[in-house]
Amino acid sequence: MDDMTPDEAVLMRAHREYWTPRVETGVVVAMGPVADPAGGHGVAIIEAASTAALEAMQRADPVIAAGRGFAYENLLMLAIAVRPSLPLAPITSVTP
């Protein structure tokens, strides 16, 4: 992401601004950029009513709408384990 052009930086800012309200309302469980030496991309966990609803959200994303070659790859999560919202024990009490 260090090699982003100024135009790509503007698109990424619009991308972040598009998804932020969906994070705040809980549609997006988690999302963020990935430090991959092979190239910049991100990962998101999104709760959608259907594949069609997910794809509609993605089509409306400014990076997709711009037609600059950005794309999504969608994979279903069959199950998820999530930590509690409040820690049940201090981190120092957990052993590896």
Image: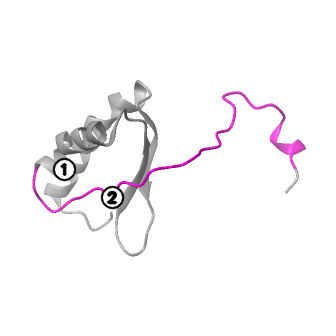
Residue at 32% in and 43% down: 51
> On the rendered structure, is 94 left or right of 16?
right
Numbered circle sitting on residue 40: none
**Residue in the picture at 36% in, 54% down:** 74
Which is the main secondary structure of the residues drawn in magenta? loop
Q: Please tell me which residue lies in front, 60 or 74.
A: 74
Q: Amino acid at mark 1?
A: Val
Split into 4 quadrants, where in the image is the N terminus?
A: bottom left
Residue that badge 2 annotates: 73
Q: Spatial distance from mark 2 to mark 1, Cα to Cα?
A: 14 Å
Q: Nearer the viewer, mark 2 or mark 1?
A: 2
Q: Earlier in the sequence, mark 2 or mark 1?
A: 1
Pointer 1: what residue? Answer: 63
Residue 53 in the image, given as x and y percentages of width and height: 28, 36
Q: Position of residue 92 (x, y in %)?
A: 86, 44
Q: Is residue 1 left or right of residue 36?
A: left
